[in-house]
Image (cartoon, helix red, strand yellow):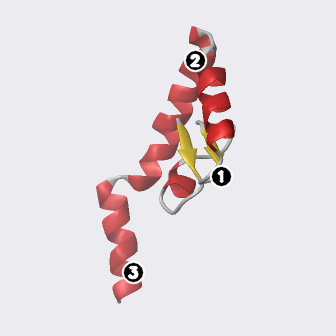
Amino acid sequence: IVATACRGNIDLIKDGVNGCIVGIDDKEAFCKKILYYSKLNDKELDNIRKQNEKLIKEFLLDKVIKEIVKICE
């Protein structure tokens, strides 16, 4: 995942772990990162996929609902 440094993205993407974050207006860095990730081998990509699967569990609906309830109480 190559994403810009904005709300939501910075919550889901851990730079260098499961993708990367670039500046919102940094088109050059965005293109460079896409090229970088397009050249990774299957093992490297699999490691990134596993990190995404692990990190996304923090944002499962039941967990998010519990957090919202805590905030609203």
Q: Quadrant of residue 39?
A: top right
Residue that label 1 marks: 23
| Of labels 2 and 3, the one closer to you | 2
Of labels 2 and 1, earlier in sequence is 1
Of labels 2 and 3, earlier in sequence is 2
- Residue at (67% x, 29% y) in the render: 32
In percent of width and height, residue 29 lies at 68, 38
Q: Amino acid at mark 3?
A: Lys
Residue 64, numbered label: none
* 68 or 3, nearer to the observer: 3
In percent of width and height, residue 52 lies at 50, 36
Tell me the distance, in whole angstroms, between the alpha carbons under discs 2 and 3.
41 Å
Residue found farthest to the bottom: 73
Q: Amino acid at mark 2?
A: Ser
Look at the image and tell me in which quarter the C terminus lies.
bottom left
Q: Quadrant of residue 28?
A: top right
Tell me the distance, in whole angstroms, between the alpha carbons under discs 1 and 3.
32 Å
Residue that label 3 marks: 70
Residue that label 2 marks: 38
- Residue at (57% x, 28% y) in the render: 48
